[in-house]
Amino acid sequence: TVPESLWLATISVSDVDQSVASVKAQGGKVLEGPLDAVGRGRMVLVSDSADAPFILLVASGDSPVGRKAKIGQWHWIDLITQDGNRARAFYTTLFGYQVKPVEAGKEHQYDLFIRDKRAVAGLVELEWEGLEDNWLPYFKVADVDKSIEFARNLGGNLILKSGKVAVLADPTGAAFGIQAR
């Protein structure tokens, strides 16, 4: 089941039904759909083999691929997982991603998912007790500290901060990242 409050990653595919078959073949699940959403396209809510939910979508309009994010817009997404090998196998098989390891320190492994020579998402391997696999979106902000203060005034909570990046939770508990560039 999907937690009550979270952000869902939406991943563009060329064929929802074919992608659903691949998700199932790799141990993932269909949680809802597929359905044709007016003005959005054909979509389905699925989960990977570790129950991280995400949406597969054939958009009825243009996808924002390659567009540079402005302040306040979504600009990146990371898959947070405790089993990087499982996640790499699932997503490289499903989407044909290439994996590029990035030096991230001793605490965790960080990889980039590459499609058509372009980084499209990250994979963070963390062994935190109680942490479930999930997708974490990041929004571009002008100032991380001011954004944290603003979020706290609105009832949000700081989960962690490192330099120009922070992870927050909104008042309902949905986690998201912010990053200044």
Image: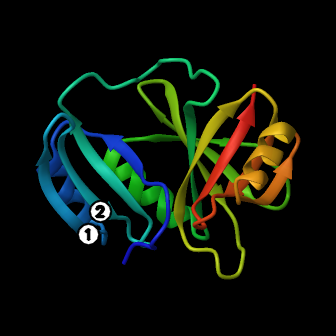
Label 1: few (<14), some (14–19) or many (≥20) C-alpha neighbours in 10 Å: some
Q: Which residue type carries mark 2?
A: Val
Give the percent coordinates (x, y) of residue 63: 32, 26
Image position of 109 (left or right of 39) = right
State whether residue 21 appears in this view. Answer: no
Label 1's element?
Answer: strand
Image position of 86 (left or right of 130) = left
Dividing the picture into quadrants, the one containing residue 41 is: top left
Give the percent coordinates (x, y) of residue 129: 70, 81
The first of marks 2 and 1 along the sequence is 1
State the residue position of label 1: 31
Label 2's element?
Answer: strand
Give the percent coordinates (x, y) of residue 2: 40, 72
**Viewer-proximal residue, 129 or 181?**
181
**Viewer-proximal residue, 139 or 118?**
139
- Of all residues shown, which one is farthest toward the bottom? 130
Relative to 50, is 168 above or below? above
State the residue position of label 2: 46
Relative to 91, is 163 above or below? above
Q: Residue at x 63, y 63 (%)?
A: 171
Give the percent coordinates (x, y) of residue 55: 32, 52
Relative to 61, is 25 above or below? below
Q: Residue at x 61, y 30 (%)?
A: 72
